[in-house]
Image: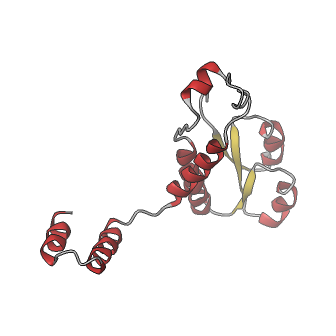
Amino acid sequence: MNDGKSFVVASGALSKQLVADIHGMPKVAAIYIFRGNRSHHEKWAKEWVKIQGVFKSITSICESLKKVAHECEHNAIPMNFVPKRMLTEGATAPGEQIHDQLPSSYMYSVIFKEIILEIVDDDAKSIENLVTYCRQQKISESELNEFQNNY
């Protein structure tokens, strides 16, 4: 547990005490409560930010964990658009920012990363869209057929 985040599934009568004990740990990313009596546990679970919900079935917990794991994978992809010189030397020229501030390009890179990672990749549909566009641009049918057959 040195480099990652933990996801805890708590069950049983001690789940309330367990949540109180581990909620403050920075490595705990999310807590899932697995109990049959949802209404009783949902009341106290709302007091804790890291609790993702009270679940009656393992299947619903697994679905939620899949979504969170997918988000964690995307957030773990490193991207850096800050000029290397700024990171190594700091800001020295009169118009540059001090090195505890990031340029606006950093904000745009974070937004760009989120947009790119949310794109659903459908190769067949993308190829069809490209072929449709090429037909509108009056590209020859032989080239389009070759493209569709090879790619």
* Residue appearing at x 76%, y 52% in the figure: 51
Q: Position of residue 34 (x, y in %)?
A: 69, 56
Res 89 → quadrant: top right
Q: Position of residue 107 (x, y in %)?
A: 65, 46
Q: Where the C terminus falls, by quadrant?
A: bottom left
116 in relation to 149, above or below: above
Q: Where the N terminus falls, by quadrant?
A: top right
> Residue extending furthest top?
89
* Residue appearing at x 37%, y 66% in the figure: 122
Q: Position of residue 106 (x, y in %)?
A: 63, 42
146 in relation to 98, above or below: below
Q: Is residue 83 left or right of residue 146?
A: right
Q: Nearer the viewer, residue 58 or 97?
A: 97
* Residue appearing at x 19%, y 72% in the figure: 144
* Residue appearing at x 55%, y 57% in the figure: 115
> Residue extending furthest front?
94
62 in relation to 22, above or below: below
Res 143 → quadrant: bottom left
Q: Is residue 40 left or right of residue 78?
A: right
Q: Nearer the viewer, residue 64 or 133?
A: 133
Q: Is residue 71 left or right of residue 120?
A: right
Q: Nearer the viewer, residue 141 or 118?
A: 141
Q: Position of residue 48 (x, y in %)?
A: 83, 50
Res 43 → quadrant: bottom right
Q: Is residue 111 left or right of residue 128?
A: right
144 in relation to 104, above or below: below
